[in-house]
Image (cartoon, rainbow, N blue to C red):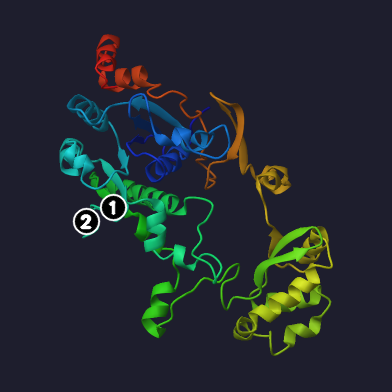
């Protein structure tokens, strides 16, 4: 496939494992970058074995648009090999524990001395400095420390988690944003820089008013189940044949919903007419709407929401997404011919560009070090004999 992506002239070396680093690499690769993923010999990235079900297909998404080389970064020869590779890169992505690159002789001071335009995206639990920087950190810990976990779930139960690793993917997304901004700066100055993204701070960024509410009023947000306290109506309601999400938490929308419900007088009822009043009577209002939706099918509620221009929709699972005509028309889900599983449906590249569209140009590498000969030969000029000798010693 022809690469017309916005980053088609950018080369990325990805040293990260599991989620944060590799998802950042996926985003950059989807936008056209040439992503060279460095994996430990033989075992590779643990993401190769992640996912639910008997067949582990999550790798096919996070490793798409990447070429795989293997290198043992725990030995001097492997470190020297990767150092040579990074000298040819525009961007380095890594998510090891702070200090690890430095221990391997691959710290930013060393790399930037040889490649002054290099942009180094570093992702870790707590950041590259501070009293917690040397602690081990996973996405779930970042979600807890950043405030996410405490407010998710039912009030009478322990904190819940999302069914995805949101802390890691948020960190990767902020890391990708940092790379794009740093590339813009490099256009002006010719100089690279280090981008430091921490799991807990990435989560903290999306915590809305949680901190200033406490600072100003001493208010501590608590778990509130399926609703945001004071934001009503905005909930999932039961129909005859399933569950339906309605978001009418604005005065004009509420009035339209009252009309759709055949009870227009509720639109001006003092209990519900204003944002504050609906928030104070949230439980009562949700029960009222739920009693109405339970008399109708999802199709009937959907038609009324469309007629009255009210934000609403079904609660989708994967089968619903695959069958939905809007998903199909937008190309939100694509089919990729993978090496291990054949044709496989997955989310498309995102966001959409009008002039430089992202694309899936190559499937995830099926084998660790699949592109050793291609990349080490192409960029570093290593011969087949040299590569064979490195493989025999466990360097690659």
Residue 378 vs residue 9, the one in the foreground: 378
Q: Residues within 10 Å of mark 1 (few under 14, many from 20)?
A: some
Is disc 1 in contact with disc 2, using a CB cutoff of under 8 Å? yes
Q: Is residue 65 above or below residue 224?
A: above
Picture coordinates of residue 194, whole percent (x, y): 25, 48
The mark tally for this picture is: 2
Label disc, if present, on residue 196 of the rendered structure = 1
Residue 305 vs residue 53, the one in the foreground: 53
Q: Is residue 9 left or right of residue 104?
A: right
Mark 1 → mark 2, Cα distance in angstroms? 9 Å
Label disc, if present, on residue 226 of the rendered structure = none
Tag 2 residue: 129
Picture coordinates of residue 267, whole percent (x, y): 74, 83
Quadrant of res 25: top left
Q: Earlier in the sequence, mark 1 or mark 2?
A: 2
Q: Residues within 10 Å of mark 2 (few under 14, many from 20)?
A: few
Q: Is residue 94 left or right of residue 7?
A: left
- Residue shown at 30% from the left, 37% from the top: 90
Which part of the image, by quadrant, shows the C terminus? top left
- Residue shown at 64% from the left, 79% from the top: 282
Residue 146 seen in the current view: yes
Residue sitting farthest toward the top: 385
């Amino acid at each position: 496939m022809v690469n017309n992506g916005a980053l088609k002239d950018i080369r990325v070396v990805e040293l990260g494992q599991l989620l944060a680093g590799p998802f950042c690499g996926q985003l950059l690769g989807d936008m056209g970058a040439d992503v060279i993923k460095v994996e430990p010999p033989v075992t590779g990235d643990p993401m190769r074995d992640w996912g639910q079900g008997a067949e582990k297909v999550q790798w096919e998404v996070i490793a798409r648009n990447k070429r795989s080389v293997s290198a043992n970064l725990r030995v001097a020869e492997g470190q020297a090999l990767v150092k040579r590779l990074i000298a040819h890169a525009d961007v380095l992505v890594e998510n090891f524990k702070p200090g690890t690159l430095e221990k391997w002789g691959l710290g930013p001071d060393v790399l930037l001395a040889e490649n002054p335009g290099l942009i180094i995206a570093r992702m870790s639990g707590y950041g590259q400095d501070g009293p917690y920087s040397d602690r081990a950190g996973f996405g779930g810990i970042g979600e807890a420390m950043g405030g996410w976990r405490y407010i998710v779930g039912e009030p009478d139960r322990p904190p819940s988690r999302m069914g995805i690793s949101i802390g890691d993917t948020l960190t990767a997304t902020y890391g990708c944003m940092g790379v794009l901004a740093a590339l813009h700066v490099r256009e002006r100055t010719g100089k690279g820089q280090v981008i430091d993204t921490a799991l807990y701070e990435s989560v903290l960024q999306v915590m809305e008013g949680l901190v200033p509410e406490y600072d100003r009023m001493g208010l501590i947000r608590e778990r509130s189940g399926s609703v945001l306290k004071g934001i009503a109506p905005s909930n999932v309601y039961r129909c005859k044949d399933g569950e339906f999400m309605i978001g009418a938490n604005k005065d004009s929308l509420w009035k339209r919903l009252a009309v759709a419900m055949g009870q227009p007088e509720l639109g001006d009822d003092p209990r519900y007419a204003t944002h504050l009043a609906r928030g104070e009577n949230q439980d009562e209002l949700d029960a009222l709407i739920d009693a109405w939706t339970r008399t109708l099918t999802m199709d009937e509620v959907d038609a009324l929401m469309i007629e009255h221009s009210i934000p609403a929709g079904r609660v989708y699972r994967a089968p619903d997404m695959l069958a939905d005509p809007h998903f199909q028309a937008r190309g939100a889900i694509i089919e990729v011919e993978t090496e291990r599983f054949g044709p496989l449906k997955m989310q498309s590249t995102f966001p959409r560009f009008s002039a430089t569209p992202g694309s899936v140009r190559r499937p995830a590498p099926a084998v660790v070090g699949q592109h050793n000969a291609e990349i080490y030969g192409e960029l570093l000029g290593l011969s087949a004999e040299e590569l064979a000798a490195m493989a025999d010693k466990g360097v690659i």
